[in-house]
Image (tube, rainbow, N blue to C red):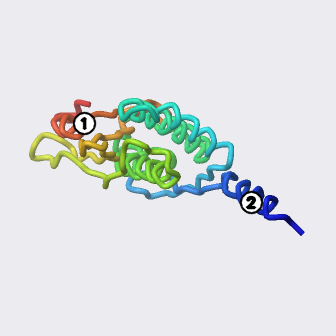
């Protein structure tokens, strides 16, 4: 029979154990294909360590978010078995491993929600995805993940421009909305 101290120690151990978490990775354009991506204890500890580095300020946390997205994308690439090309063009539609901005923003938002759920975001909250462009303004429609800092300023986390594992663009949403004319970053 366990003592009270033994029960407390066991419950503390149970709380500290990081259970595996599964996310769905969208690819093939507009989530045509979905691949299960499991984050085991080692992955969750690595992500937590990355995010701890950014705990001191909102700016530091955005740098940590960038590193966490890169970690996630490298892991997703291994799970899918194909490396995503940068700026997924229409030639990658229905091609396993290739991602358009819908796939990228969905995947990044899933990761950000995981960080938020696990209490790893100290200075930001996850917002709904957003878009810019509508052809008539010279811009192809483009989607991105979004976080808001404690002041309410919204920041995009846009991983579409780089190949999988590259650093995402992280900038104020207001600045991001002015970009993207005729394919400009």
Percent across and percent down for residue 41 are 68, 48
Picture residue at 62% right of the left edge, 50% below the top = 39
Residue found at the very far right of the displayed protein: 1
Residue found at the very far bottom of the displayed protein: 1
Up the image or down, 118 lies above or below 150; here it is: below
Front one among 48 and 169: 48
Percent across and percent down for residue 116 are 45, 51
Residue 4 shows which numbered tag?
none
Picture residue at 33% right of the left edge, 34% below the top = 170
- Would you say 144 lies left or right of 17 here? left
Percent across and percent down for residue 179 are 19, 34
Percent across and percent down for residue 77 are 56, 41
Task: Please rate how many residues cluster around mark 1, counting C-alpha atoms within 10 Å: few if below 14, some from 14 to 19, many from 20.
Answer: some
Residue, disc 2:
8
Picture residue at 15% right of the left edge, 46% below the top = 135
Front one among 114 and 167: 114
Q: Quadrant of the N terminus?
A: bottom right
Picture residue at 44% right of the left edge, 58% below the top = 32
Front one among 6 and 18: 6
Q: Quadrant of the C terminus?
A: top left
Residue 172 shows which numbered tag?
1
Task: Please rate how many residues cluster around mark 2, counting C-alpha atoms within 10 Å: few if below 14, some from 14 to 19, many from 20.
Answer: few
**Residue 27 visible (yes or no):** no
The residue tagged with tag 1: helix, strand or loop? strand
């Amino acid at each position: 029979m366990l003592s009270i101290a033994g029960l407390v120690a066991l419950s503390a151990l149970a709380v500290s154990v990081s259970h595996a978490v599964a996310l769905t990775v969208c690819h093939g354009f507009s989530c045509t294909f979905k691949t299960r991506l499991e984050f085991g204890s080692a992955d969750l500890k690595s992500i937590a360590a990355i995010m701890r580095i950014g705990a001191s300020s909102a700016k530091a946390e955005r740098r940590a978010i960038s590193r966490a997205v890169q970690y996630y994308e490298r892991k997703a690439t291994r799970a899918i078995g194909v490396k995503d090309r940068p700026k997924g063009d229409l030639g990658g539609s229905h091609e396993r491993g290739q991602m358009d901005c819908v796939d990228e923003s969905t995947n990044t938002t899933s990761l950000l929600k995981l960080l938020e759920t696990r209490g790893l975001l100290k200075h930001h909250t996850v917002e709904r995805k957003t878009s810019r462009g509508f052809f008539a303004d010279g811009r192809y429609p483009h989607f991105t993940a979004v976080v808001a800092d404690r002041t309410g300023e919204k920041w995009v986390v846009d991983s579409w421009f780089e190949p999988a594992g590259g650093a995402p663009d992280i900038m104020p949403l207001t600045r991001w909305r002015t970009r993207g004319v005729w394919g400009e970053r």
